[in-house]
Amino acid sequence: MKKVKVYIDGEAGTTGLKIRERFKEKENTEILTIDEALRKDSAERKKLLNAADFVFLCLPDNAAREAVSLIENPQVRVIDASTAHRTHPDWTYGFPELSGEHLKAVRNSKRVSVPGCYASGFVALVYPLVKAGVIPADFSVTCFGISGYSGAGKAAITEYENEERNPELNSARLYALSQEHKHMPEMQKHSGLNSPPMFNPMIDDFYRGMIICIPLQTRMLPKKHTAVEIIEIYKAHYPESGEQSGPEKVRVKVQEKYESGFLAANTLSNCDDMELFAFADSESERILLTARLDNLGKGASGAAVQCFDLMRSGYKK
């Protein structure tokens, strides 16, 4: 079998490095590598971008757009891990579990944009409930999230792991105070909401993992639903993978019961799964929708390689 050529543009970054690690276990693939001295040379990058069968973009947004503009070979299939194309109408949103249409689109697309980490949990929770009519599209949604510091990039990782760091890094820190977080446009668009959510993210002193929470006051909904009913909606929307394996394996797991009084954010570190929960008081007056995932797994490199596996399964050169 002929090897599939893969080029990772931006492989020195956190996501790029993690994707490169995953390809150590991939059969029949050849990683195209740029000379370190030519890493920012447009002509050399263009050559590799057009020589590959699959390209991963692990770049800042403007650099990702530039990379796409350098691709002239119509056979090259691109998986973009940046924010640049997540709401672009010509790009496929790389969350195959959302629906059969999403799965088919990822498999057949030549341009796939990998969801953001916070957006992955948010969309996974909200999209099925908007589709089922539980949450109206014009509903005012509030979201809280907390993530490990690896999601903030190499500079932040260096800052957090410096022995002489600012003492404020010992605590959780709220950010995006002006409600301008870069994930918000995709959170709105791909969940089916008419307006952006109120989003309150935090970064904390642990390396990887995250939790996204959405509180629902059920008296504010058109029809009151219990937490059990919401779990059933999630189960119908995200069927268990069972013995299924390979590129179409379902990574979203609906959790019916959780006995502990605490939910740790780092439990799924080094795992590509996402867990969904619905916690509630005894009368389901107040329901807390919760998603837990690894911000470097299902929230980044894991999702990117999942899209690659699907796209490769339908690949014909």
Image (tube, helix red, strand yellow):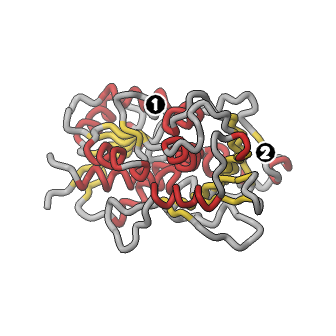
User: Residue 256: x, y in percent?
Assistant: 59, 67
Percent of width and height locating residue 55: 32, 43
Question: Mark 1: few, some, or many residues within 10 Å (few <14, many ≥20)?
Answer: some
Asked if labels 1 and 2 touch by Cβ distance under 8 angstroms, the answer is no
Give the labeled residue for mark 2.
173
Circle 2 crowding by C-alpha within 10 Å: few under 14, some 14–19, many from 20? few
- Amino acid residing under circle 1: Thr
Is the residue 146 above or below the residue 282 in the image? above
The residue closer to the viewer here, 17 or 295, is 295
Residue toward you, 18 or 267: 267
- Whether residue 243 sits left or right of residue 251 in the image: it is left
In percent of the image, x 60 and y 30: which residue is there?
Answer: 138
- Let me know if residue 146 appears in the view: yes
Label 1 SS: loop
Q: Which residue is mark 1?
A: 87
Q: Earlier in the sequence, mark 2 or mark 1?
A: 1
Q: Is residue 140 left or right of residue 254?
A: right
The residue lying at 56 percent from left, 28 percent from top is 194
Position in image of residue 310 (x %, y %): 30, 53
* 31 relative to 212 in the view: left or right: left
- Please name whichever residue, 230 or 195, is drawn nearer the observer in this view of the structure: 230
Q: Quadrant of residue 254?
A: bottom right
Q: Secondary structure at mark 2?
A: strand
Observer able to see residue 37: no
Estimate the x, y position of residue 166 in percent, counting from the top left.
Answer: 83, 46
Q: Which mark is residue 267?
A: none
* Residue 231 occupies quadrant: bottom right
Picture quarter with the N terminus: bottom left
Q: Amino acid at mark 2?
A: Arg
At a point 61% along the width and 58% down the height, the residue shown is: 292
